[in-house]
Image (tube, grey):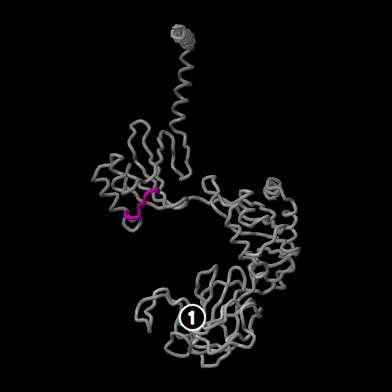
Amino acid sequence: MKEKIKSKWGISALTLILVVSSVWLLNFTGNDTPREFTITEQNVIEIKEEVQLDSYGFNVIDTQIEEGRVKRNQSLYLILRDLDVSPQTIYEINKKSKGVFQSNRVNPGQRYIVYKDSDTSKPYRLILHDNALDYVTFEWGDEIKVTTGQKEVTKEINIASGVITSSLYESLVEKGNNILIANRLSEIFAWQIDFFRLYPGDNYKLIYEKQYVDGKPYGIGDILAAEFEHDGRTYDAYYFQGDKSMGFFDSEGNGVQKALLKAPFKFSQRISSSFNRNRFHPVLKRRMPHNGVDYAAPIGTPVLSVGDGEVIEAQYRGANGNIVKIRHNGTYTTAYLHLNGFARGITPGTRVRQGEVIGYVGKTGRVTGVHLHYMIYKNGQPVNPLNIDLPPSKSIDASERSQFEKMVEDLKRKMENDRVESVASVIKEE
Ligand SMILES: [Zn+2]
């Protein structure tokens, strides 16, 4: 009972304040000169003419913006129908979409943005996002237009560092860094560090480009410099792009990534079948991927290991015949099939050097004739050995050495400063 009374009084008090203040306002307005009114009107006009662009470059003054996600089984037609767009207009939009947008490309969960006139609440524009970056704009205001666009990716120089306690992945997650950095680092140092066998206490520091879309972290750009201390030894890599030299080099200017031999032979051999994910198999008479390159080399031709590594398989294995598999690093493994026999000492666990003979061309296993089936695995997946993009192992060109050394000095100085904020400001100042 008491409560009710209280609240009743509460309302009355509030009403009183409102009444008082409106009277005061009225008085104030009443006392004002007409000049004051003119100014107010001008202000309104000024706001109407003001241009405020959104991140798509559209004026959002007098515009209502609504965001949504495509629902299951919702087509572009249904999205537009829900926005009360007439079937005739939808038909015109569809016609204009030809060659720009395929209406069957709408998937549940896609983000879309609707622009409506704030006076009439009538929609006149729809932006449909393919992903965080790419989008299609449909407009049906004054004229019907369908265009594609891409959001701007902005970059910021960032520093990441960490000490490994259990894994590189975990040390990145712990510090809130993008886990893609782990892939990049293992690719850069693939020839020096076995990323599957890191030790607690191993540590790293790198300068990289952090990418943003709409102010939100989007991905990582180039890695500019990286230092990795593994098992008490420090490895470093600096990205350099000159006219003569390009890629990652250590602070001495030596190429960090070693190339694999172009082919596992001393002399060039004829290719009888290339890498093909959808080949008609000549023996099995059905479509199956050909995950390697066939070299029609004469029987007994020495087969070379294309890089330094460890033999992880050397045996007769069914359709593969005599196979040798060599693990070069955490990223690359190569395989040599249908061998006539193995070179002396080629057994699992053996270390081999680039160019070392590991076996001889033969026709063991499921084959139609003598050939070597050669494969490269990158992160466990077969890749085409003929177009794999392996960086050169050359050193910095003499003509670009001083330019490179200056860059290294600069990046080293920045890396010494571990705090992200201070590094960002140093770079901004320049
Ligand atoms: Zn083959």
Q: Position of residue 415 (x, y in %)?
A: 72, 54
Considering only vertical position in the picture, is 69 above or below 282?
above
Q: Residue at x 53, y 87 (%)?
A: 339
Q: Amino acid at mark 1?
A: Val
Q: Residue at x 53, y 75 (%)?
A: 376
| Left or right placement of residue 386 versus residue 257 in this view | left
Q: Position of residue 88 (x, y in %)?
A: 23, 46
Specify the segment rendered in magenta. 103-109
Q: Closest to the observer: 205 or 47?
A: 205
Callout 1: few (<14), some (14-19), or many (20+) C-alpha neighbours within 10 Å?
Answer: many
Whether residue 43 is visible: yes
Q: Closest to the observer: 300 or 255?
A: 300
Q: Closest to the observer: 376 or 80?
A: 376
Residue 105 lies in the magenta stretch: yes
Number of marks in the image? 1
Considering only vertical position in the picture, is 3 above or below 136?
above
| Quadrant location, the N terminus | top left
Q: Position of residue 72 (x, y in %)?
A: 34, 48
| Left or right placement of residue 358 versus residue 408 in this view | left
Considering only vertical position in the picture, is 125 above or below 168?
above
Question: Which picture quadrant has residue 99?
Answer: bottom left
Per the image, label 1 sits on a secondary structure element best described as strand
Q: Position of residue 107 (x, y in %)?
A: 36, 51
Residue 64 lies in the magenta stretch: no
Residue at far left of view: 88
Q: Residue at x 67, y 74 (%)?
A: 394
Q: Closest to the observer: 117 or 345?
A: 345
Whether residue 30 is visible: no
Queried on whether the Cβ of the residue with tag 1 lies below 8 angstroms from ligand 1, the answer reads yes
Question: Which picture quadrant has residue 367?
Answer: bottom left
Q: Read off the residue under disc 1.
A: 293
